[in-house]
Amino acid sequence: MDFKLAGLTAILLVGASGLAVGADTPVVESLCVMPDQAAEAPRRRPGRSVERYKLPVCDASNLDSDAVTPWVDPFDLGAPVPDRWRIVELLGITTNLWDPYGAHNPLKGDLPMWGKDWFYSLIAISDTVIEPRRFPIPVGGATTQRPQSLDTIGDGDTLILAQNLIIENVIYKGDTVFRPPDWEFRFTSVFNINEVHADEKGILNVDPDGGGNNGIRRRDTFMG
């Protein structure tokens, strides 16, 4: 009876050791091919060659788990920085609101304006147009700039001055490095002032006097 019990115990121990080895074997076989195993050749269509990817042959030194060198991170980034925007102040970099090219300006979203993740960006664009031109212009209906002239074509010299000031205000929340902002509020305003000079009456204003400008000058302003 003791002999049978000892034999059954030996069989169970051998089976358990086989299961332990078999648990690690599929991982190794999925990475490479054992040297004593031959890869199965698939069936090929006549007249067409089929190339099959061949797994590398397992190295005997890699089969031992104790011989494998553990992975080490080559880049040690250190502890996380809670506030990566204001840490540059420790290096002596100060904030200059009048420098649009500086790297530490809150007016262009370099660091939070309110709290930890509310940013403000101010964009200003100045667009100036100066256009002198000359082309044939007929004389005015009521009068002309040159009353002693008998020509039907007046003086065609004109000058256009236009100034546009575009101001864009953007307030947004969130980190925009790897994803869009969580909230964004944008307000864009345009201020325009333009003035035209013409050397012939009746072109810019139907009134020959033109409000005291002799009808040859006009100025308008707009905001949008």
Image (cartoon, rainbow, N blue to C red):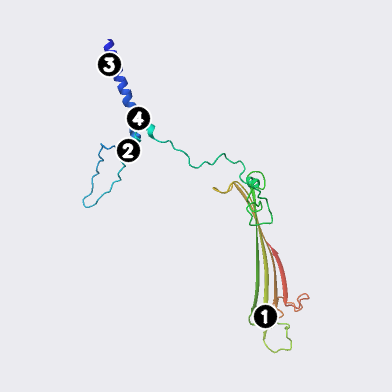
Q: Residues within 10 Å of mark 3 (few under 14, many from 20)?
A: few
Numbered mark located on residue 110 in the image: none
Mark 1 or 4, which is nearer the eye?
A: 4
15 horizontally vs 209: left or right: left
* Residue at which label 1 appears: 157
> Callout 2, which amino acid?
Asp
The answer to which of marks 1 and 2 sits earlier in the sequence is: 2
**In which quadrant will I find the N terminus?**
top left
Which image quarter: residue 99? bottom right
The answer to which of marks 1 and 4 sits earlier in the sequence is: 4
Judged from the image, the secondary structure of the residue bearing numbered disc 2 is loop
Q: Nearer the viewer, residue 147 or 76?
A: 76
Numbered mark located on residue 59 in the image: 2
Q: CA distance from mark 1 to mark 4?
A: 94 Å
Q: Residues within 10 Å of mark 2 (few under 14, many from 20)?
A: few
* Residue at which label 4 appears: 23
Q: Residues within 10 Å of mark 1 (few under 14, many from 20)?
A: some
Which image quarter: residue 56? top left
Could you tell me which residue is drawn at 29 percent across and 16 percent down?
A: 8
Q: Are marks 4 and 3 in contact (CB under 8 Å)?
A: no
Judged from the image, the secondary structure of the residue bearing numbered disc 4 is helix
Judged from the image, the secondary structure of the residue bearing numbered disc 3 is helix
On screen, 118 above or below 200? above
* Residue at which label 3 appears: 7
Judged from the image, the secondary structure of the residue bearing numbered disc 1 is strand
Q: Nearer the viewer, residue 73 or 109?
A: 73
The answer to which of marks 3 and 1 sits earlier in the sequence is: 3
> Callout 4, which amino acid?
Ala
> Callout 1, which amino acid?
Asp
Q: Position of residue 44 (x, y in %)?
A: 23, 47
> Callout 3, which amino acid?
Gly
